[in-house]
Image: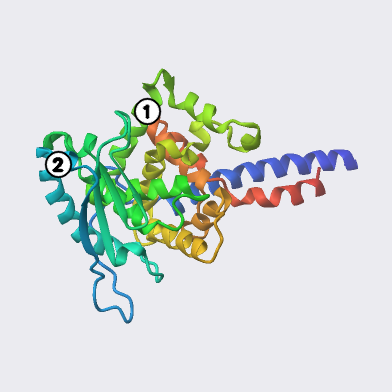
Amino acid sequence: MSTPAIRRLLRMICLVVITACLSVSYSSRAVSVIHAEYDPAIAIPMQPVIYREGETDLIMPNIVELQEDSEAFFEPNTVKFRAKAKEIVERWYRYLRRQLWTPQHVPADDVIYLLYRKAPSSGSAAATASKNYIFFYDSYTNTPEKEKTYGTVIHEIVHLLQHNYMHHWAEWMSEAIAYYIQHAYFESWSVNIFMDITRKAMVEHQNGKTIETRFHNIYCRKEQVGHCRGFRERGYIYKQDAIHTAGMLRLIDSYHPDKRVVETLHRILYEKAASGTMKYSNEDFSNTLLELTGASLDEYWCDYMARVTGEESKIQTCYRPRIYQYLPNFLPQIW
């Protein structure tokens, strides 16, 4: 047999072997990442408080109410809200301080100020947080009780714990962590509920534009060309809709409940910021997840979106076999 014929035969054999390996690798990687007991309808249970060596007392900050506007402070619905909000902060700050543990001192460890004020405009936020202040606006606090969700209080507590990194490079992830704690811990959302929110956002128009269009309008600038693959492919970096990133985190947590992925990401971000490093890139997040769980950001987002769009049959192909990293060096030798 001539040399060219031998090379052709080797190519055919190689392609058959690679195809078989990839098929097995896709399946085995997906199985290794996705636990068989995964059930998207199950809510996350409350995690026990974790005490570390040398820690015997829970941190108990003083809770102080402040009024910037007396009318906003004494509105009937706001009075009811104030009592409930204070109760939630007193209980949940201590709990979340231990779950999202960092050894560094946080300003809110000493005192937390709950400041009530008039909303600057009709479209303003329900609440905001900075250092050890939570600002509540009357457009939220004075709404009827049945129309309010107290999860917003939890969301802002998380921001108190993120105070040194939430406005830096990781802002989209800080928002996602806050949404995750608010909805998965406090409101007991299952993965299915998060996916329903994402599914609805994918098809509804908001301000006359779809979420896909808004994603491109904000991120597709010359300096951010690498982010322009669209919401379906890279929507987890979309800060304005970090609720969808929270859904992906909830999915990851359902696969790896023992890894405490969200708590680990928070601790890494806090400690990076404390050391003076404010930049934590998407690649850094991806590598952290890869090390913790065996899969990357893009792989998990692909999985999440496949479930959102009802394409579960494609989930297996989301988890790229590691054999790919060897092909560039191997193929030239026989081609």
Of 301 and 263, the residue lying toward us: 263
Query: Marks 2 and 1: CB-CB under 8 Å?
Result: no
Q: Is residue 72 left or right of residue 280?
A: left
What residue sits right under mark 1 in the picture? Answer: 201
**Res 309 seen here:** yes
Numbered marks: total: 2
Q: Which mark is residue 78?
A: 2
Which quadrant would residue 112 be assigned to in this image?
bottom left
Q: Element under label 1?
A: helix
Q: Residue furthest right?
A: 2
**Residue 248 at x, y = what percent?**
40, 44
Q: Is residue 102 above or below residue 314?
A: below
- Label 2 amino acid? Thr
Task: Identify the residue at image location x=45%, y=48%.
Answer: 173
Q: CA distance from mark 2 to mark 1?
A: 31 Å
Task: Identify the residue at image location x=21%, y=58%.
Answer: 64
- Label 1 amino acid? Ala
**Res 42 seen here:** no
Q: Is residue 122 left or right of residue 242?
A: left
Q: Is residue 68 left or right of residue 309?
A: left
Task: Identify the residue at image location x=53%, y=49%.
Answer: 169
Q: Is residue 137 above or below residue 296?
A: above
Q: Quadrant of the N terminus?
A: top right
